[in-house]
Amino acid sequence: MSGLLTGETACALIARGLSEAAGQGQAVAIAVVDAGGHLLAFQRHVDTMFSANEAAVAKARTAAGFRRATAEMQSKLEQGRTAYLSLPGCLPLAGGVPVVIDGHVRGGLGVSGAPSERDAAIAQFAVAELAAAGVSQTAIPATQSPERTDDADE
């Protein structure tokens, strides 16, 4: 693997996520973006509500841009940290995870259409299962962020 998030890998992430969602009886939309927030791949279940489409992309962009799981951001929001609501392009709702390759955030994956905790679980599953398949790719748990040089939430 070259250290970059490819379209092929993005499609594999989505396939795994959609399979997990179907197993849970959830109709979701899943998006994968690169580190710059540009859409690499997107797919939705035919019964997904249309509002989930944009939410999935926004969660993926938020996870990539802030280099953390959006579940972590939602938790902080629920604790009163409302500053997240004023940040452009930030959707602090569970369901987005950074895609980490060789220790660096190379993109994000967002899931929307199920309850937030299920969106988050599906996103984590998609990335974790891909790593288990032998691709050098891991997700950062919702309670841990990859190494960052910025202190955006401090």
Image (spheres, rainbow, N blue to C red):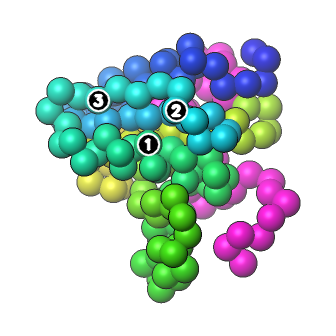
Disc 2 crowd, CA 10 A, few/some/many (<14, 14-19, 20+): some
**Which residue is disc 1 drawn over?**
57
CB-based contact (under 8 Å), mark 1 and mark 3: no
Say whether residue 121 is left or right of residue 101: left
Which residue is painted at 29% across and 29% down in the image? 44
Give, as a three-letter code, the residue at label 1: Val
Which residue is painted at 57% across and 18% down in the image? 7
Label 3: which secondary element: strand
Say whether disc 1 or disc 3 marks the residue closer to the N-terminus. Answer: 3
Residue farthest toward the bottom in the current orientation of the protein: 80
100 vs 7, nearest the viewer? 7
Image: magenta residue range: 125-154
- In the image, residue 38 sits, relative to residue 2, either above or below, namely below
Which residue is painted at 32% across and 36% down in the image? 29
Q: Quadrant of the N terminus?
A: top right
Give, as a three-letter code, the residue at label 3: Arg
Whole-number angstrom distance, CA of label 1 to CA of label 3: 11 Å
Give, as a three-letter code, the residue at label 2: Leu
Observer able to see residue 138: no
Q: Identify the main secondary structure in magenta.
A: loop
